[in-house]
């Protein structure tokens, strides 16, 4: 069994991590624009007031705003069938509160989409990838306030209307289940805290679970409304959810570990997608909310909105897996805006993320058993320190190995009967890391000459993996 004909091969990025031009052509400040650089050892910070001399990587990122034609051409050379990117909400509504959209921002995405379509690359657009307007964060604590649903819908409706006929695939919120997690939640939901009185927030930010879960409820409603209205605007739209999937295993056969793992999976891996794919809150959340003293305010009509606004397809990022245990002898490992117990059978990346290709096959089966919906893996990849070889090229055989093993396991999942329709590996071009705010953590097939000390001319170079991925796409995943 091979990948199906028409399988969507491509790559993924996010506006705040590659565009730069943070205040050009009318763009406003987003939550990511107030985030400083950091590293694996030094947490990044959010500063509600810009600090003189402090480095904010999203402000220049990899300057894609001015170089998108060159970048899309390189993606086309690899044979991309799909390109996942996000629209930067603050290019369209700079503060989030304007009545009229910013034409220059809309025009930029017109050009970007046209450029993709020119090469028959299907755009796959994320509406919100950690890019909530900072004015909404300040006034409303992001999605903690119900008002933000309307602001989001104004933005979503504007871009749906503008790009209908040119774009088919949309995702509402990037890694929405980050909202269940105190580390990633505040960034995903815009719930930073008291921005008037605090000069900085260290990532992860102080957390109030009730506020966070309320904000998550508002994003569910916003996502469901976007699905409903998107379908009215263009019945051909396919609108999906986007989850962090980090496969989770019980560390031991101790039944207590199994239950702990099941509970972890309920909250982290299934709660949000159950709401978005099945259109209702799952029953296990009642107990969780009760035991954690969390009261969610729902308005009449929310249940119907969630029911009618279930998504058309499921997507996720997949980088790693974790274990869960009730036993003391555990070793903690880092992960994608979260952590967990180490798995003794796995190796980890330079950032400590455990590499588990088989866990991807396992996850894809679990997801498909649960929802029977088409699935795309819209992020996967290896963040690594790349060095140029003597011939001046990056020979990223470690990245090729990582990707090959994951694609092999996707193939197994297809053979298992999973309806997998696409794969967009993360950071198809080097960009700024979301968790650490650094350039040094590279994912791309394309090397970008830009460095954390501020040096670099942004020039692009093909890595060895560029040629490898081109061959993978050419052969529809046969020649790995
Ligand atoms: C996902 C995000 O969490 O993982 C991306 O959707 C992010 O924005 C990617 O870049 C990889 O994480 P990091 O921290 O290595 O950039």
Image (cartoon, rainbow, N blue to C red):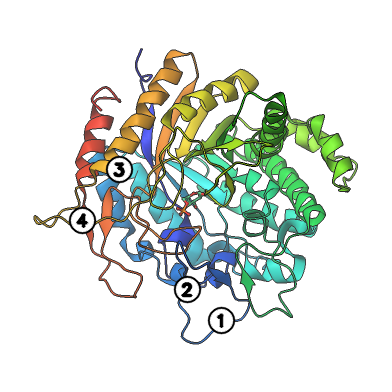
Q: Which residue is mark 2?
A: 56
Task: Indicate the secondary structure of the residue bearing disc 1.
Answer: loop
Q: Nearer the viewer, residue 458 or 153?
A: 458
Whether disc 2's CB lies below 8 Å from ligand 1 is answered: no
In the image, residue 145 lies at what x, y percent? 79, 59
The disc label shown at residue 61, or none = none
Measure the C-alpha gap from mark 2 to mark 3: 27 Å
Q: Nearer the viewer, residue 290 or 342?
A: 342
Q: Which residue is mark 3?
A: 399
Task: Indicate the secondary structure of the residue bearing disc 3.
Answer: helix
Do residues under tags 1 and 2 come within 8 Å of each other at their CB atoms? Answer: yes
Which numbered disc flags the more N-terminal residue, 3 or 4?
A: 3
Q: Is residue 230 above or below residue 375?
A: below
Task: Indicate the secondary structure of the residue bearing disc 4.
Answer: strand
Side of 475 where 91 appears, left or right: right
What is the crowding at mark 4: few (fewer than 14 residues within 10 Å), some, or many (at least 20)?
some
Q: Which residue is mark 4?
A: 461
Which numbered disc flags the more N-terminal residue, 4 or 2?
A: 2
What is the crowding at mark 1: few (fewer than 14 residues within 10 Å), some, or many (at least 20)?
some
Q: Nearer the viewer, mark 3 or mark 4?
A: 3
In the image, residue 42 lies at what x, y percent? 49, 68
Q: Which residue is mark 1?
A: 50
Residue occupying image coordinates x 28% and y 42%: 398
Of the 4 image quadrants, the one containing the C terminus is top left
Image quarter for residue 8? top left
Q: Nearer the viewer, residue 399 or 30?
A: 399
Outermost residue, bottom side: 52
Residue occupying image coordinates x 73% and y 57%: 143
Residue occupying image coordinates x 60% and y 41%: 329
In the image, residue 397 lies at what x, y percent? 23, 42
């Amino acid at each position: 069994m091979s990948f199906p004909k028409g399988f969507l091969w491509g790559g993924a990025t996010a506006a705040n991590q590659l565009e730069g031009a943070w205040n050009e052509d009318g763009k406003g400040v987003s939550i990511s624009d107030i985030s400083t650089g950091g590293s694996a050892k030094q947490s990044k910070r959010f500063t509600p007031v810009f600090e003189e001399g402090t480095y904010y990587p999203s402000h220049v990122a990899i300057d894609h705003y001015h170089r998108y034609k060159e970048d899309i051409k390189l993606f086309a050379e690899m044979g991309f069938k799909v390109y996942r990117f996000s629209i930067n909400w603050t290019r369209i509504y700079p503060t989030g509160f304007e009545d009229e959209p910013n034409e220059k921002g809309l025009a930029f995405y017109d050009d970007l989409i046209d450029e993709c379509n020119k090469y028959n690359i299907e755009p796959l657009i994320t509406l919100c990838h950690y890019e909530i307007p900072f004015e909404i964060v300040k006034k409303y604590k992001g999605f903690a306030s119900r008002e933000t649903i309307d602001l989001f819908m104004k933005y979503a409706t504007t871009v749906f209307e503008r790009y209908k006929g040119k774009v088919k695939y949309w995702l509402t919120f990037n890694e929405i289940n980050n909202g269940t997690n105190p580390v990633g939640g505040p960034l995903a939901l815009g719930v930073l805290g008291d921005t008037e009185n605090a000069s900085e927030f260290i990532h992860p930010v102080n957390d109030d679970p009730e506020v966070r879960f309320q904000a998550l409820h508002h994003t569910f409603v916003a996502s469901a409304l976007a699905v409903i209205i998107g379908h009215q605007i263009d019945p051909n739209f396919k609108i999906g959810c986007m989850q962090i999937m980090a496969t989770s295993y019980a560390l031991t056969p101790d039944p207590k570990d199994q239950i702990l793992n099941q509970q972890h999976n309920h909250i982290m891996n299934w709660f949000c997608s159950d709401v978005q794919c099945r259109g209702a809150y799952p029953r296990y959340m009642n107990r969780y909310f009760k035991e954690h003293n969390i009261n969610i305010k729902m308005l009449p009509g929310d249940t119907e909105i969630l029911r009618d606004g279930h998504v058309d397809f499921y997507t996720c990022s997949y980088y790693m897996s974790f274990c869960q245990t009730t036993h003391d002898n555990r070793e903690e490992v880092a992960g994608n805006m979260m952590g967990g117990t180490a798995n003794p059978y796995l190796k980890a990346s330079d950032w400590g993320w455990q590499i588990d290709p088989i866990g991807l096959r396992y996850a894809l089966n679990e997801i498909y058993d649960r929802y029977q919906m088409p699935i795309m893996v819209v992020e996967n990849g290896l963040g690594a320190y790349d060095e140029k070889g003597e011939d001046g090229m990056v020979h990223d055989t470690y990245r090729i190995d990582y990707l090959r093993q994951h694609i092999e396991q996707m193939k197994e999942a297809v053979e298992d009967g999973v309806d997998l329709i696409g794969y967009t590996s993360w950071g198809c071009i080097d960009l700024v890391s979301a968790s650490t705010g650094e350039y040094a953590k590279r994912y791309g097939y394309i090397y970008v000459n830009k460095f954390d000390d501020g040096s670099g001319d942004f020039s692009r170079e093909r890595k060895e993996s560029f040629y490898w991925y081109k061959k993978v796409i050419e052969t529809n995943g046969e020649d790995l």
